[in-house]
Image (cartoon, rainbow, N blue to C red):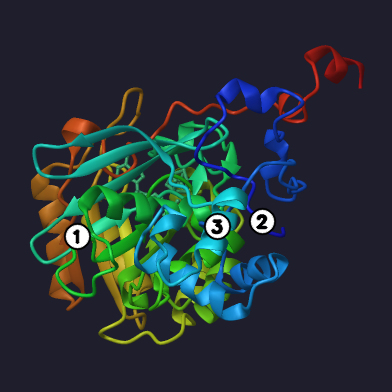
Amino acid sequence: MPRGPNPFAWRPRPPYISAMTDSAPKLNDFLPGGPMAAPAAGSRTELVGLTRAELVREMERLGEKRFRADQIFNWIYFRGVTDFAAMTDISKALRARLAETCSIGRPHVVTAQVSQDGTRKWLLRLADGNEVETVFIPEEERGTLCVSSQVGCTLTCSFCHTGTQAWVRNLTAGEIAGQVMMARDALGEWPTPSDDRQITNVVFMGMGEPLFNYDHVKAAVDLIKDEKGLNFSRRRVTLSTSGIVPEIRRAGAEMRVMLAISLHAVRDALRDELVPVNRRWPLAALLAACRDYPSLSNARRITFEYVMLKGVNDSDADARELLRLLEGIPSKINLIPFNPWPGSRYETSAPERVQRFGEIIRSAGIMATVRTPRGQDIAAACGQLKSESVRIPGWKRRGETKEDHARA
Ligand code: SAH
Ligand code: SF4
């Protein structure tokens, strides 16, 4: 779907309910495949999320030269300014015009929590009232920002809290890159530093399946990787996917970032249950796409995430089968002790079991790490993210009444 101009004016943001009225853009306008609403007369074009090419078009629309777009790109994505007045290499007249017609937004921070272990979690409210979460995990050697790519998830992995929440919509490129920008605001990390920064890595391990929101994720990744933008090396950006095979191949060709696969089971029958998308792309197809992922080497391995579920997938035989499946793929295994959530039907494997499973893998010369649950006191650990956003029925999104819908 065409992306710019971005109708998401994050500031000021309309109250949730106003999105349902005739004067406001319909929620349907933001859905994949839905028409992108032209900004209403008097509304501003949101610049965050526009790619370089889109920013050039925007400047041309305003009758400006292309190089203006480079200057503005730098102010927005490298320096992190949110006020046109700060753009000192741009004439006062143009700054005033930009301030009238455009905006540089951030998602609205509803709550910012800090865990005892230093993990931070932000609950963000988007222009249409939907909410997503972003988590920052500081470690000794690095700091990882875990971003969301969708509100809810279309998939229903049985051990994941987000999976219990219906899919509401895809995030736009601006809403994804905006999470990194909001975190840089919060941690005081502008202008984009190259060393000494707290946020060293970005992982798509928050809410949603990034490869089911391919175009917007790709546009956001481009902004995140751009040296004159958010400036993360592609080795420091990781897409985590439940296994959307065709898009893994596309991402390998077009994004070339690091890949993490949510494997979780070594037999199709069990994986069908834990990660239902396996019925569409079973293990053999998934592992073939992993084998073909470009530029794999000892230094560039695919991470296989494996949630440890007591008595379900954590036996010695499972560990040995895992080794067999991954033969020939430069891999590392990330064992994730299951993080329970209210109503979940699994238990976490005992620490000795996780340790034994890891030893079997390591004894074959494959790296296996155990992910220490972080930020549990603020429910920021993997699979615990779940905002209060709820699915809005199609008739409501189209601005119809329930009665219209019943008649149709
Ligand atoms: N949709 C993508 C990315 C988001 S999930 C994916 O599935 O890969 C990020 C990681 O957290 C995935 O590996 C997921 O399987 C894992 N996860 C989900 N729920 C979990 C839970 N309750 N405990 C531990 N890990 C979980
Ligand atoms: Fe969606 Fe990933 Fe959770 Fe599965 S594990 S429901 S793909 S967010």
Q: Is residue 137 left or right of residue 6?
A: left
Residue 213 visible, this angle: no
Disc 1 from disc 2: Cα separation: 33 Å
Q: Quadrant of the C terminus?
A: top right
> Which mark is drawn over residue 47?
3
Question: Amino acid type of disc 3?
Answer: Leu
Crowd class of label 3 (few under 14; some 14 to 19; many from 20; radius 10 Å): many
**SS under mark 2:** loop
Q: Is residue 135 left or right of residue 398?
A: left
- Residue denoted by label 2: 5
> Which mark is drawn over residue 101?
none
Q: Position of residue 394 (x, y in %)?
A: 73, 29
Which label lies toward us, 1 or 3? 3
The quarter of the picture where residue 253 lies is bottom right
Question: Amino acid type of disc 1?
Answer: Gly
Residue in front for this viewpoint, 233 or 152: 233
- Residue denoted by label 1: 143
Q: Is mark 2 within 8 Å of ligand 1?
A: no
Q: Is residue 60 above or below residue 120?
A: below
- Given contact means CB atoms under 8 Å apart, are the residues at marks 3 and 2 in contact? no
Q: Looking at the image, which residue sits at the far top?
A: 403
Disc 1 from disc 3: Cα separation: 27 Å
Q: Is residue 393 left or right of residue 149?
A: right
Residue in front for this viewpoint, 260 or 402: 402
Q: Quadrant of the N terminus?
A: bottom right
Residue 334 visible, this angle: yes
Residue at left offset 47%, top offset 32%: 164
Q: Is residue 358 above or below residue 111?
A: below
